Amino acid sequence: MLYGLDSDVPRFERLRVSHAPLSQNFEIGLPAVLLYAPQEFRNLCLVSRTLEGFGHRECFVFDPFRLVRDRYGKARTRDLRAISAGAFQKIRWHRVERPDELLREHRDHRGRVIATVAAENASPLGEFRFASTDLLLFGSESVGVPADIIAATDAAVTIPVSGQTRSLNLAVAVGIVLFELRRQLGPNSASSTSSP
C-alpha cells in the first residue's frame, strides 16, 4: 500500500516483508539502510538529509514510535521542512514490521547485514570493508541495536570514540558511516566493488 502521494508529505510504504524487496539503493550501487526503532523525530529529519545528500533514495525503518507518518501537524511539518531541508520527502520510507524477517531475507538473497554498535569488540569503522550489497543497520538513540538482532547480523562495526561519551547521536553516526562507505566505494558507487 502506498501512502504520501501528496508532494508535501513523505513517500511512505508499509511493508509486510516476506521477501526482501529489491532496494532502489542497490540499483545505484549503494547499500540499503535500516533504522531500528528511532525515537527522535528531529534525528530522523537529519538522517533523511544525510541519506539524500549521499545519494540514497530510500530507507527501511522499524518504526514502533510511528515517527514516519502520512501527515504531520504544523509543528512537525515546520521541523520536517527546516531540519531536513526538503530531503525527508525525497526519501522513500519503507516501514518494516518484522525486522528479523527483513534481515534474514537480505542475508539469504542479497548480501551481508552490518550492525553499527557502540562496542569495543566490534570492528573499527575504518578497518571494515563495505560492499554495495550490504544492509546497514542503525539502532535507536537510547538503546542501540538489541542484542538478539546483533546476533542475527554478519558483522558489527563501531565508530571509535575517545571522549567520555560512549556513543554518538544517531544522525551523526549515520553521517560518519555513510561518509566512510562513500570513501571506500567511491563517488560513483554503482561502478565500485568491494570484497568482504
Image (cartoon, helix red, strand yellow):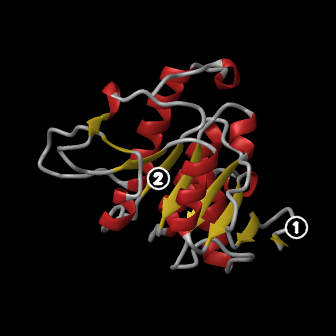
- Report the residue at 56% width, 44% height from top: 50
9 with respect to 152 (left or right):
right
- In this rendered view, identify the residue nearer to me: 161 or 14: 14
Q: Quadrant of residue 14?
A: bottom right
State the quadrant of the N terminus: bottom right
Residue 151, horizontal then vertical, whole percent? 34, 58
Q: Amino acid at mark 1?
A: Leu
Residue carrying label 1 = 5
* Residue located at (37% from left, 48% from top): 116
**Is 138 situated above or below 32?**
below
Residue 46 placed where, x, y %?
53, 53
Judge from the rendering whether residue 76 lies leftward or rightward of residue 70; answer left or right: left
Q: How many marks?
A: 2
* x, y percent for residue 32: 60, 46
Give the quarter of the figure containing the C terminus: top left
In this figure, which residue is indicated by the disc labeled 2? 137
